[in-house]
Amino acid sequence: MKKTSNKIAALVLSAAMCVTLLAGCGKTTTASDSTPASTSKASVSASVEEKQPEVKGYSEAPMLADQVAAGTLPKVEDRVPDADNVFVETKDANGDPIAIGTYGGKITMTGVSGWGLSRPINESIIRFNCDGTWYPNVMKSIEHNADSTVWTFHLREGMKWSDGDDFNADDITFWYYMCHRNNFDGKKNGWKCLLDQKVDDVQTYPELAKVDDYTVTWTFTQPKYESDFILDGDFKWCWAPSHYLKDLIPNYEGYEYVENPYWPNPGERNEEAVLAAAKTLGIEGSSTKDVGKVATYNWWNCSGLPTLCAFTLPANSSIKDPLCVAVRNPYYWKVDAEGKQLPYLDELNFYTCEDEQRLLLFRDGTLDIIDIGVGDIASTLSDMGGAASLKTFASVEWGDTQITFNYTIADENYAKLFANPDFRQAMSICVDRTKVSELLSEGFLEPGQCAPGVGNFGYDPEWTNKWTEYDVAKAKKLLEGCGLVMGSDGFYTFADGTPLRIDFYTYDNPESDTNNFAVLAQYFKAAGINCAQKNMELSAYDQAIDNNDWCACIGPHTSIGGLGLNDRPAPFVPIAQAAEWYGEYGTYYGTNGAQGVKPEGDMAKLVELYEQWKATDGDAAREAIALQIYEIHKNNLWTIAYMKNGNGYVLANSKIQNYADTLVYADKYQNANIVHYATLFIAE
C-alpha cells in the first residue's frame, strides 16, 4: 500500500476519522470481558454477537449448477454446511450491510508474489472489523476456561476443503504435530502464540487434543491470555489438508517425528523421499525446507493445494505465470443473506507488470484495482469520470521516511556512536523536514517524527514533534559531543582518526524508500556525515540484516508501527529476528540466548515489560504496560522518521460493488483481506 498525502485525506476525513479512531490500542472488547472469573468456561466471540439470519435454502453460481447437472459436482446442499454451521456474510468490515450480488465476472489486479495472493483470499481462525472487534471465522466458536490455560475450538460441521474432502479436527492435529511441531513449516518457534513456558531453559509447547471430529483443545501449563493466543497477529491458521499432504511429512534428523496419539510415525522418510512425494503433487522445492515452506506455510502459492478459501489456485495456474488465475472454490462455506453461495466472482486474476505500467493498465481497463500515489489521484479521477472509485486505507504506521541504525554492529566505533541518543538527535534535526516533504510528497505529508499518529494508541503531540526542529549548528555541536572530529574534507571522523561513513541499505521494492536517500543525503553531508547508499534485491537485503552485516537503512523492511502490541509485538519489542531497529537483540530472545546479542539498558527493559504484558490479563492493565513500552521508544527514538505517515489509496473500477470506501490497512487485519473479496461483484 503506497503511503500518500494528508491533503487528499482531507477530502475523505469525515469517513477516515471514524476508522482511524479504532486505534485505541487495537483493543478488542469481547464477551469474555464480562464473564466472572469463577465461570468454568468463557466465550470469546465477537463483542456484539448478532444471530445470523436464517437461510431457507441455498443457490449457486450458474457454472457450478451446470456441473451439478452434468453429474461432475455434488449438489450445493452437500457442499455447504447446514444452517447451524454455515457462515452467513451480511456486513462489511465497517459493519455496513453488503448488497446481494450477482454471479460472474472477474477482477484483475497485480501483486501475486509473496503474500500478494494470500491477502485477498485467506480465511483465518478469526476475522477483524475496522474498529478492532472480531468474530470467529473458520472456527465456529472459541472458548477458554477460567484461568485461560485451556482453549477450545469448535469447527463447522459439514465444512469441506476445496477438493471436497471433509475439513475436521484431523486436519488440525495433522498440522500441529506433523507440520508445525517438527518445524516442517519453519515456524516452530516463530509463532509465540504456540509457545508454552520454558522448563530448565527448554521450550515447551501446548498439548493439542482432539475431543471429537469437530472439537479440539489447546492446553497450556500457564495462562495463555486472549491477546497472546487467539488475537495474536501470527496465529492466522492451524490446519493443513491431511489427506493431501500425509505422504509428504519428513522423518529424519532435523525433522524428527513428534510423538502424538493421532498420527503414526511415518518411518524413515529422508529428503529424497520428501522431494519425490512433493514432485507427484506438483510441489516445487529443492530441499525439504523449501517443500515444507511452500506446502504448509506459504500454502496459498502452491498450485493445486486444497484450501478453505473462496478462491483457490488450480494445478494449471502458477504465481509465476504472467497472468495468474485463482478460481472459485465450489465448496466454499459462506453464503449471503439469501443463501447464495459465495463468492460471486468467477475468478481473481493477478497480472504481472512493471510498476510504471499500472496506472496506464488501469486507465485502459486491463486492471480493475491498483494502489495509487497521491500525485496521480486527481488527474485520474478527472479523466476517468465515474469509471473509477477512490478507496482510502487509514494508516497505523509510525511516520514516513524512516531511518534506523544497526545497534549491534560489530565495529565498536559505530556501535558506540549509534547507541548515543545525541547522535540520533543530530541525525534528526540536521534535516529540513518541510523541504523533504516538498521534495518527496509535494508538500502533502506533514513534518513529523517516528511516533503514533492522531487517533492511534499512544498518540502524543510532544513525541510527534520531538527532535523535528531544523538546526544544523546544533546538530554539529551534538555530533562533536559524541566525540567526532571534523576532517579537512568537511566530514567527521571518529576520535581515533578512523573515517566515518554511514552506508544506508535500501532494497528494490515499490514501497521501500530507495529514492529517498538522495534527498536525505544532502542534509546528512551538509552536517558533516559522509554517507552512501547500498541498494540490493530484497532477498539479499534481508540476508544482510540476518547476518548482522549492515550499518544503517532507509525504509526498514519491518518498521516500527502498527495497531499496537495486540497486533504484533515484534515491531515494538526485540523478541525475534524481525525488525532492523533492534537487529541481533531480537535474535537473542528468539533463539533463547543461543545466538544474537543480549539486550541491555532500555532494550532489556522493553523485553522485561513485554514479559509482564504477556503474563497480564485485562485490557486496562495490559494497556498501561504497553504505554510504558511506548514511553521508552519516545525517550530513545531508535528509529527516526522525517514526516508523518499518510493514508494509503486504491483506485477501483466503479462497477465493483461491496468494496467499502474507507478501510484500515494493518498487518493484523491482513491488509487487503479486510476488503472481503468473496462478497465483491460486478454491476453491469
Image (tube, helix red, strand yellow):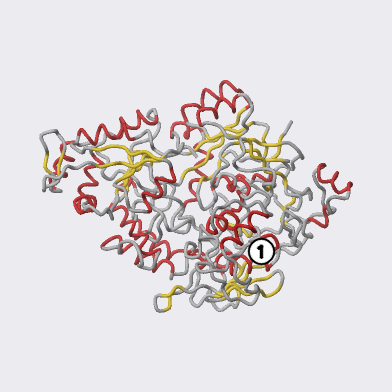
Q: How packed is label 1: few (under 14 Cα within 10 Å), some, or many (20 or more)? A: some
Point out residue 309 in the picture as x, y percentages from the top left corner: 67, 51
User: Which residue lies most toward the top here?
Assistant: 383
Residue 440, picture quadrant? top left
| Front position in the image: 147 or 419 | 419
Q: Secondary structure at mark 1?
A: loop
Q: Is residue 343 above or below residue 364?
A: below
Q: Which residue is mark 1?
A: 247
Residue at x 37%, y 29% (from the top left corner): 443
Quadrant (top left/top right/bottom left/bottom right) for the C terminus = top right
Point out residue 343 in the picture as x, y percentages from the top left corner: 72, 46
User: Which residue lies most toward the front here?
Assistant: 272
| Front position in the image: 567 or 93 | 567
Q: Mark 1 belongs to which amino acid? A: Asp
Point out residue 155 in the picture as x, y percentages from the top left corner: 69, 65
Residue 84, picture quadrant? bottom right
Residue at x 67%, y 75% (from the top left corner): 211
Residue at x 46%, y 52% (from the top left corner): 563
Is residue 422 found left or right of 172 in the rendered image?
left
Residue 161, picture quadrant? bottom right
Is residue 443 found left or right of 358 in the rendered image?
left
Q: Is residue 251 above or below residue 311?
A: below
| Front position in the image: 444 or 561 | 561
Point out residue 606 in the picture as x, y percentages from the top left corner: 34, 62
Q: Is residue 1 above or below residue 621?
A: above
The mark tally for this picture is 1
